[in-house]
């Protein structure tokens, strides 16, 4: 379990730069939003999910997530067919906040081009550098806001 | 000066909801896919009411009253709650790329804050101070004067929507909207004047023109981003997009009455406490608090009560989250004789009493 600047980023997952994560089990890829996203976004109040059997491409927006009055994007970390949606989110979107890598999973993709596409996702040192930079920018913004 | 942006400014006529929202949706598309610099769209709507993307329109509005009064209704593509629009309310659409210098790497919170700062500068020109509060509203002494909402669109582009109140028709609002505030208004309690204000009210002049406010917004953008605007109109590519959004989104019942929204409920909770009677009016959208009004016979200030209400709007309705969000803003003297657990309990009573709208 990796802790990067206080954010929980499990080692075994792959991460997209738009803050979705991918858990690979054979050709099935479970997708959710990472700890940095859920903490920066605050309470998730609505999730607009695609339909099962929809096809998605890596990097494509496949859902929308509302936090307060901002609507953000759920970006598919890999290409393939959506084979399962987390229906529990319909009743409790806060699962994405309370358990982002567990009960807060969002959907499962049957991946079609996994080997090539995993190379475009982040793990290890690349992930550490990415999150450290995101944290640096977020902290600078908070400091600026507190000065005002 | 670092660049030239485009300004669509419409003071000739107020537009339909379909037209205004379609132009706004085209802005981020044009920035991302049509090599346009950032575009600011300033205009007014005909008398109308617009719900947020994920609101339940049939629960949020009294549609029969809207139809009877000729008030258009529609659904926008950005988040947040219901807004009344009309010829005395400045509507603003803004399309920009997240990578634009000054915004790059700032995250959504930083972008909201930047745009909030622009509005604050604009309103300073009328001689009063406003500030951006973290729940995406512009306030003057705790009263809302403008609401901001946003959506991440294609690629790295963003769409901002804002409504800035130059003047406001409270009677219309009470007649067509379903909110906890309306229930209070029906009981003779004018809660709106304590929670909302307008540019004309703050300046104390009824002759402030909408165009003056638009010009102040334009100037504040120029100053904040060190750019100049070029007045422009949508080009052919953009007009095609606008037509497409009008035909395939904003005149379509599937969009306006979209059922991809959480269930809407409303509940009232009363609790006798050491500090007095607490009366809570709660609107819920699925598991989230869409709106809340805290009232009763306790001792507090309008500003403090508004602060507590705002801390809970558009957040999770789970007990631990309610307590967490109240604690973030709570001070011992906010409501005399009350504490966070008691206030949380009163809100949970309202939640227990919820009924489907």
Image (cartoon, coloured by chain):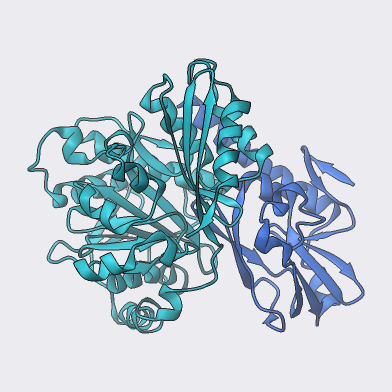
Vertical comparison of A122 with B74: above or below: above
Q: Colour of chain B?
A: cyan
Vertical comparison of A119 with B222: above or below: below
The answer to whether any part of residue B7 appears in the image is: yes
Residue drawn at 81 percent across, 67 percent down: A30
Q: Nearer the viewer, residue B136 or B352?
A: B352
- Judge left or right: residue B150 versus residue B261: left
The answer to whether any part of residue B102 appears in the image is: no
Q: Position of residue A91 (x, y in %)?
A: 67, 60
Q: Position of residue B124 (x, y in %)?
A: 25, 34
Residue drawn at 66 percent across, 63 percent down: A90
Q: Nearer the viewer, residue B207 or B327?
A: B327
Most extreme residue toward the left, as rendered? B207
Most extreme residue toward the right, as rendered? A26
- Judge left or right: residue B240 versus residue B150: left
- Judge left or right: residue B270 versus residue B67: right
Q: Position of residue A40 (x, y in %)?
A: 63, 45
Vertical comparison of A13 with A7: above or below: below
Q: Quadrant of residue B17?
A: bottom left
Q: Quadrant of the C terminus of chain A?
A: top left
Q: Position of residue B117 (x, y in %)?
A: 38, 39
Q: Nearer the viewer, residue B231 or B247?
A: B247
Q: Colour of chain A?
A: blue
Q: State how many labels appear.
A: 0
Residue drawn at 49 percent across, 60 percent down: B151
Residue drawn at 40 percent across, 83 percent down: B248
């Amino acid at each position: 379990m990796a802790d990067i600047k206080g954010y929980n980023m499990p080692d075994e997952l792959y991460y997209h730069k738009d803050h979705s994560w991918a858990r690979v089990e054979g050709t099935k890829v479970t997708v959710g939003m990472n700890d940095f996203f859920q903490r920066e976004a605050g309470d998730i109040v609505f999730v607009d999910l695609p339909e099962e059997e929809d096809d998605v491409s890596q990097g494509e927006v496949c859902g929308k997530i509302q936090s307060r009055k901002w609507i953000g994007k759920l970006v598919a970390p890999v290409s393939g067919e959506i084979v399962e949606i987390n229906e529990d989110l319909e009743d409790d979107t806060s699962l994405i906040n309370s358990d982002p890598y567990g009960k807060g999973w969002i959907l499962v993709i049957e991946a079609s081009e996994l080997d090539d596409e995993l190379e475009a996702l982040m793990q290890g040192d690349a992930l550490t550098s990415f999150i450290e930079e995101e944290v640096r920018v977020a902290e600078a913004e908070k400091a600026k806001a507190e000065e005002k | 000066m670092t660049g030239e942006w485009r300004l669509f400014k419409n003071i000739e006529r107020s537009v339909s909801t379909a037209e205004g929202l379609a132009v706004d949706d085209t802005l981020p598309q044009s920035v991302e896919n049509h090599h346009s610099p950032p575009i600011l769209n300033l205009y007014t709507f005909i008398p109308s009411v617009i719900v947020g993307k994920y609101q339940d329109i049939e629960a949020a509005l009294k549609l029969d009253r809207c139809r009877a009064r000729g008030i258009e209704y529609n659904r926008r593509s950005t988040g947040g709650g219901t807004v009344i629009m009309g010829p005395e309310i400045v509507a603003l659409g803004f399309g920009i790329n997240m990578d634009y210098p000054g915004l790059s790497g700032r995250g959504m919170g930083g972008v909201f804050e930047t745009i909030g700062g622009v509005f604050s500068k604009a309103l300073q020109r009328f001689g009063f101070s406003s500030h951006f509060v973290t729940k995406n509203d512009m306030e003057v002494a705790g009263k809302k004067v403008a609401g901001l909402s946003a959506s991440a669109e294609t690629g790295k582009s963003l769409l901002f929507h804002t409504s800035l109140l130059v003047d406001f028709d409270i009677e219309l609002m009470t007649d067509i909207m379903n909110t906890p505030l309306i229930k209070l208004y029906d009981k003779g309690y004018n809660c709106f004047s304590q929670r909302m204000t307008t540019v004309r009210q703050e300046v104390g002049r009824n002759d402030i023109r909408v165009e003056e406010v638009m010009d102040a917004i334009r100037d504040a953008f120029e100053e904040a981003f060190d750019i100049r605007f070029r007045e422009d109109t949508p080009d052919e590519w953009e007009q095609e997009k606008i037509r497409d959004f009008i035909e395939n989104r904003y005149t379509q019942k599937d969009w306006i009455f979209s059922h991809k929204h959480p269930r809407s409920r409303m509940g009232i909770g009363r609790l006798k406490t050491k500090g007095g009677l607490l009366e809570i009016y709660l609107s819920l959208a699925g598991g989230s608090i869409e709106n809340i009004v805290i009232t009763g016979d306790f001792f507090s200030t309008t500003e403090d009560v508004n602060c507590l209400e705002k801390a809970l709007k558009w957040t999770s309705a789970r007990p631990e989250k309610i307590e967490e969000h109240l604690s973030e803003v709570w001070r011992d003297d906010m409501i005399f004789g009350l504490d966070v657990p008691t206030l949380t309990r009163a809100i949970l009573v309202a939640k227990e009493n919820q009924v489907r709208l």
